[in-house]
């Protein structure tokens, strides 16, 4: 499927819940109370039906995300159902890793091929400050993912000045030791506007300069490390592979965008940084046939904007936990 700007869109990121067992500073506003009722969440059968429709239109890559996808009790049923849809070539999962130790093996058996684990710090107190969680559990999850034989495991870290700046070098070394790519993500305005301030924002360019004080960064033109907009570098001495996701500072960020997002309440968002949404759940629950769902997907594709609005005083109406990362 091509959007109006000629970009091929074949990647659907599905948020299966807005709930999370962590409280990341950048994802969920403090005291957030906007939870959907669970009856508003798409059921496993509804998700799988929408994936079938999407695959019929040309979507090939599916990512299960959230909130935290592993808090959903039927995650394995969802993964198996998605795996069995003709046309789906790969299923990825984004997780904070807190429940991954027990689930890595069953997820792999259920057809999940790649896993991204969020890891914003290695120092337990810093990790807890950013996420409210326990880094020891995440590290156990990363080890379990290594043992489960996923085709690829990546680490994701959101950059926050004065919060996890000091963690970047330890994280880079850890990634190298584990043989896993590390992606450094610029903070996007997806919680309350106060979180994205000059004070907190650490641009990729600066993170790159910090790492360059420790090691030489060699650009990797086409490392085939995924479907995203990261720019990868090999660090010559440590052997780490580090990707930079500069949603705010890279002016070319949206040029290759190949994704749409299905949210846990059944709305489809053609762009993370734009409020436009189309409701699929209403059509599903009014028993419309697949053709109606196909038309709604195509309408979303027609409305996919050229680029996100993050650089234009963007006011997040929904936090990231509700949209799905
Ligand atoms: N709970 C899972 C996890 O931790 O990966 C999946 C959902 S989370 C929303 C997906 C990704 O979005 C994570 O890598 C997270 O760090 C990133 N993210 C969340 N809020 C963000 C923000 N305001 N700016 C940049 N990245 C953000």
Image (spheres, rainbow, N blue to C red):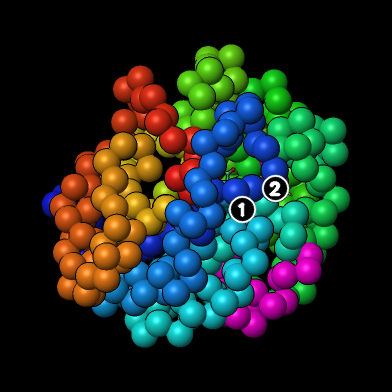
The local crowd at label 1, few if under 14, some if 14 to 19, many if 20 or more residues have their Cα within 10 Å, is: many
Ligand 1 neighbours mark 2 (CB distance < 8 Å): no
Residue beneath label 1, please? 68
Residue 102 placement, left or right of 23:
right
**Residue at image coords 77%, 42%:** 133
Work out whether 150 lies above or below 309. below
Question: Residue shown at 85%/33% (left/top)?
Answer: 125
Residues 160 and 16: in front is: 16
Which corner quadrant of the figure contains ligand 1? top right
As helix, strand or loop, the secondary structure at mark 2 comes to loop
Position of 303 compared to 60: left or right? Answer: left
Which residue appears at 42% of the width and 78% of the height?
Answer: 89
Pointers 2 and 1 in contact (C-beta within 8 Å)? yes
Report whether 221 appears left or right of 79.
left
Pick the front one: 227 or 289:
289
Quadrant including the N terminus: bottom left
**Residue 118 coordinates in the image, percent (x, y):** 65, 49
**Residue 77 seen by the camera:** yes
Query: Badge 2, how many Cα within 10 Å: few under 14, some, many 20+?
Result: some
Question: What is the x, y in percent for residue 271?
Answer: 32, 45
Residue 277, percent across and down?
Answer: 29, 45
Label number found at residue 21: 2
Label 1 SS: loop
Chain-order first, disc 2 or disc 1: 2
The total of numbered circles placed on residues is: 2
Question: Quick check: 310 above or below 18?
Answer: above
State yes or no: residue 231 in magenta. Answer: no
Q: Which residues are magenta?
A: 101-120
Answer yes or no: disc 1 within 8 Å of ligand 1: yes
Percent coordinates x, y for residue 278 in the rendering: 26, 50
């Amino acid at each position: 499927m091509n959007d109006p700007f000629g970009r091929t869109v074949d990647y659907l990121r599905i948020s299966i819940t807005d709930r999370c067992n962590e409280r990341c500073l950048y994802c969920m506003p403090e005291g957030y109370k906007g939870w959907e009722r669970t009856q508003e969440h798409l059921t496993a059968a509804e998700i799988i039906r929408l994936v079938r429709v999407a695959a019929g239109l040309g979507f090939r890559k599916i990512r299960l995300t959230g909130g935290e996808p592993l808090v959903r009790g039927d995650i394995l049923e969802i993964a198996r159902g998605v795996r069995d849809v003709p046309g789906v070539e790969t299923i990825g999962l984004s997780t904070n890793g807190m429940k991954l130790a027990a689930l890595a093996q069953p997820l792999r058996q259920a057809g999940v091929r790649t896993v991204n684990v969020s890891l914003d710090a290695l120092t337990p107190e810093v990790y807890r400050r950013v996420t409210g969680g326990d880094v020891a559990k995440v590290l156990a999850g990363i080890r379990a993912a290594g043992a489960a034989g996923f085709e690829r495991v990546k680490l994701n870290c959101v950059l926050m000045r004065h919060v996890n700046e000091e963690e970047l070098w330890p994280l880079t070394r850890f990634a190298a030791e584990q043989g896993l790519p590390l992606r450094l993500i610029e903070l996007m305005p997806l919680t309350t506007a106060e979180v994205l301030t000059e004070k907190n924002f650490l641009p990729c360019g600066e993170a790159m300069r910090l790492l360059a004080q420790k090691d030489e960064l060699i650009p990797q033109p086409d490392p085939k490390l995924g479907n995203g907009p990261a720019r990868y570098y090999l660090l010559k001495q440590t052997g780490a592979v580090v990707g930079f996701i500069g949603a705010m500072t890279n002016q070319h960020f949206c040029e290759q965008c190949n994704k749409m997002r299905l949210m846990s309440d059944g709305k489809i968002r053609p762009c993370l940084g734009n409020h436009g949404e189309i409701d699929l759940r209403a059509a599903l629950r009014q028993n419309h046939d697949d053709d109606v769902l196909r038309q709604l997907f195509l309408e979303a594709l027609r409305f996919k904007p050229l680029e996100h609005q993050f650089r234009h005083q963007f006011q997040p109406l929904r936090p990231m936990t509700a949209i799905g990362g």
